[in-house]
Image (cartoon, grey):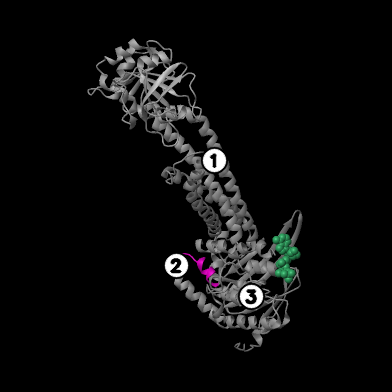
């Protein structure tokens, strides 16, 4: 029946094309929304990549960046001296928004990251830096800036800038880490811990200890031991990453998924409508087919094939147009880099949606076609 | 002679919201293999209703109907569909070709409905369709769409389609109702040719002319009121082979 479905489709070209365009637009929208969600997720994951293989010793519940956590520097020193902790790969750190600073375009505040000089790589994780990648031997107010933060304050390596009477000397700028959305690291100003404490008015305080387990211990053991010793504190590990993503994106995801569901419904109704019209128009033909011995099952297949053809053609064109559309949108929103590869997961998701639309929107029309009595249809003029 | 169709006390009652319409009222009918039967009668007398029943499109409300010895009055829709696809060839007044398909694909179409042992592959289906189109003299129009054909030509395609599954019998409800006299003659010649080659033909007609050399039955108010069978048996008329 597939070949017959194709012939029927060709016989009603203009209607088919209208329907295909509609489906295409729907698929395109679903695809773009999906990519946006995907990018949001993956940039958050990228941000949380800092956590990989490490753990963050925090207070007041876990989170990343741990700007909400506060503890005494002494406690930090105590933790660093434990045998489970590889002191050379671990550091005390202070995370706090730079008060009185300008926010970037996206409204994200610049994040002060205070680290023990020499331990910058614990946070930087070997991301390439223009200029110096260490604060050792630099002035007290030397800073290494994230690319976004550098843009926000419009500074280059060697510049000095002032926020709230505090002066900062830029010795290095980290190359952009996040692909789409800027990450915490892109928005950070890394400086020596004492200067960070003075700038943010948190004398003798830190937010977290970034811990690398020493070679003899597994991540899990270290977590358990620390938790046993410091019941009031929390240990943030890779396992908590997904939770953070979910918490951050819950609202957006619900909204986006609602949008997808609505577009999905629209395209279903669209094809269903076309197929109902087609079944109605073809009452006499369907009756004739039934009279000359076509099985009900084949009639159903014919209708479902037709709706699948409509949705697949529309779907494939739509999928092909997702990347260009996404780029055009990106350029309109100020992005400078083009990215024509759509994540496979998004393609698979959209393809599945197309299949479901095609099959299900054919079901009701197919059921109607099934109920056509050949006798009635043959009387029908 | 062997019975192909045997109907006993056939009733068909339509219930139109409380009002009952009896389209057939205890009609008896027998048709033998190889016969050419013409059914006549006034409009509304139940001819199409009877044809639908013989064509396994409909079950009688009451009474028994046997086709080729099989009792069809109790069959399910699925079984009826199978009988239709294997044993019956339909010809309609309004031709009822499938407009999106070429003449060849239209003729081939009933063969797609065959299943099980009778199933044919694509090339033998094509071959059979082309053979049948040769019989009706339209082999040169095989690749055309029905819309490009005249009424008479369309009906010839319909005859080819009705023949393609080698049915036991052909049911034609006013096959010449929409045709001029020349096309009518052509179609009647073809139907007689088909009948000569062994296929039983049952035809409904309003045109006295078309009943020549056939067994005429007359229906009125849902019952058979006249049947030429007896007369035909007595005077065996040699049926001329049509040109
Ligand atoms: N589906 C139906 N519902 C209700 N009544 C019906 C239905 N089909 C047929 N009838 C009635 O049954 C009677 C017989 O109809 P039928 O179509 O068999 O007549 P006919 O002899 O073929 O007439 P014609 O020569 O006009 O084609 C008519 O009174 C018709 O109105
Ligand atoms: Mg009729």
Task: Please indicate, yes or no, whether residue B198 appears anywhere in the rendered image.
Answer: no
- The mark total stands at 3
Q: Quadrant of residue A149?
A: top left
Residue B189 within the segment the image draws in magenta? no
Instruction: Give the image location of residue A294, x and y in percent.
Output: 55, 63
Rendered view: B124 above or below A313: below
The chain containing the residue under callout 2 comes to: B
Quarter for ligand 2? bottom right
Between B88 and A187, the one lying in front of the other is A187
Instruction: Give the image location of residue A37, x and y in percent.
Output: 48, 37
- The residues bearing labels 1 and 3 have C-alpha atoms spaced at a distance of 58 Å
- Which residues, given as a range, are shown in magenta? B107-120
Pointer 2 local density, CA inside 10 Å: few below 14, some 14–19, many at least 20: few
Instruction: Give the image location of residue B183, x and y in percent.
Output: 67, 81
- The residues bearing labels 2 and 3 have C-alpha atoms spaced at a distance of 28 Å
Q: Which residue appears farthest toward the left when viewing the image?
A: A216
Q: Which residue is mark 3?
A: B202
Rendered view: B164 above or below A218: below
The answer to the question of whether label 2 and label 1 lie on touching residues, with beta carbons closer than 8 A, is no
Which quadrant does the C terminus of chain B fall into?
bottom right
Q: Which residue is mark 1?
A: A260
The answer to the question of whether label 1 and label 3 lie on touching residues, with beta carbons closer than 8 A, is no
Task: Please identify, in this view, whether the residue under mark 2 or under mark 1 is nearer the observer.
Answer: 1
Between A323 and B137, the one lying in front of the other is A323
Rendered view: A210 above or below B193: above
Pointer 1 local density, CA inside 10 Å: few below 14, some 14–19, many at least 20: many
Q: Which residue is mark 2?
A: B117
The answer to the question of whether label 2 and label 3 lie on touching residues, with beta carbons closer than 8 A, is no
Q: Quadrant of residue A80?
A: top left
- The residues bearing labels 2 and 1 have C-alpha atoms spaced at a distance of 48 Å
């Amino acid at each position: 029946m597939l070949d017959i479905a194709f012939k029927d489709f060709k016989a009603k070209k203009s209607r088919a094309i209208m329907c295909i365009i509609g489906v295409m637009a729907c698929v395109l929208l679903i695809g773009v929304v999906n990519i946006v969600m995907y990018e949001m997720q993956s940039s958050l994951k990228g941000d949380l990549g800092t956590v990989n293989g490490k753990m963050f010793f925090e207070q007041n519940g876990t989170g990343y960046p741990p700007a909400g956590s506060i503890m005494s520097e002494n406690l930090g020193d105590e933790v660093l001296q434990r045998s489970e902790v590889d002191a050379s790969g671990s550091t005390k750190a202070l995370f706090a928004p730079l008060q009185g600073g300008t926010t970037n375009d996206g409204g994200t505040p610049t994040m002060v990251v205070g680290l023990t000089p020499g331990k910058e790589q614990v946070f930087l994780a070997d991301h390439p830096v223009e200029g110096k990648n260490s604060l050792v031997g630099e002035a007290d107010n030397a800073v290494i800036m994230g690319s976004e933060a550098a843009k926000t304050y419009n500074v280059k390596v060697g510049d000095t800038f002032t926020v709230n009477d505090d002066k900062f000397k830029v010795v290095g700028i980290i190359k952009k880490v996040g692909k789409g959305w800027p990450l915490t690291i892109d928005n950070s100003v890394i400086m020596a811990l004492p200067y960070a404490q003075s700038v943010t008015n948190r004398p003798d305080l830190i937010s977290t200890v970034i811990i690398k387990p020493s070679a003899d211990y597994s991540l899990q053991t270290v977590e358990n031991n620390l938790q046993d010793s410091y019941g009031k504190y929390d240990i943030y590990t890779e396992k908590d990453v997904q939770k953070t993503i979910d918490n951050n994106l819950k609202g957006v995801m619900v909204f986006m998924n609602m949008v997808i569901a609505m577009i999905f419904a629209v395209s279903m109704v669209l094809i269903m409508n076309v197929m109902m019209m087609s079944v109605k128009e073809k009452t006499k033909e369907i009756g004739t087919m039934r009279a000359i011995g076509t099985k009900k099952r084949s009639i159903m297949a014919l209708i479902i094939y037709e709706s699948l053809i409509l949705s697949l053609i529309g779907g494939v064109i739509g999928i092909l147009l997702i990347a260009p559309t996404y780029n055009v949108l990106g350029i309109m929103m100020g992005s400078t880099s083009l990215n024509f590869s759509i994540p496979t997961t998004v393609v698979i998701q959209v393809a599945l949606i197309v299949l479901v639309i095609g099959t299900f929107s054919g079901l009701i029309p197919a059921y109607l076609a099934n109920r056509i009595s050949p006798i009635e249809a043959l009387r029908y003029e | 002679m062997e019975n192909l169709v045997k109907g006993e006390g056939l009733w068909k009652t339509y219930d139109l919201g409380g009002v009952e319409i009896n389209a057939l009222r205890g009609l008896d009918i027998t048709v033998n293999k190889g016969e050419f039967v013409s059914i006549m009668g006034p409009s509304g007398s139940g001819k199409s209703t009877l044809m639908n029943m013989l064509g396994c499109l409909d079950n009688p409300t009451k009474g028994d109907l046997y086709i080729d010895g099989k009792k069809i009055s109790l069959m399910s829709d699925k079984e009826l569909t199978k009988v239709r696809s294997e044993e019956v060839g339909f010809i309609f007044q309004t031709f009822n070709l499938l407009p999106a398909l070429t003449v060849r694909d239209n003729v081939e179409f009933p063969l797609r409905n065959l299943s099980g042992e009778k199933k044919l592959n694509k090339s033998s289906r094509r071959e059979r369709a082309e053979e049948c189109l040769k019989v009706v003299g339209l082999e040169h129009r095989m690749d055309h769409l029905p819309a490009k054909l005249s009424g008479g030509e369309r009906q010839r395609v319909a005859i080819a389609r009705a023949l393609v599954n080698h049915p036991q019998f052909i049911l034609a409800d006013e096959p010449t109702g929409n045709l001029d006299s020349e096309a009518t003659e052509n179609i009647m010649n073809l139907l007689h040719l088909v009948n000569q080659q062994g296929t039983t033909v049952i035809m409904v007609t309003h045109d006295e002319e078309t009943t020549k050399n056939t067994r005429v039955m007359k229906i009125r108010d849902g019952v058979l009121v006249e049947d030429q069978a007896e007369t035909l048996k007595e005077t065996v008329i040699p049926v001329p082979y049509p040109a």
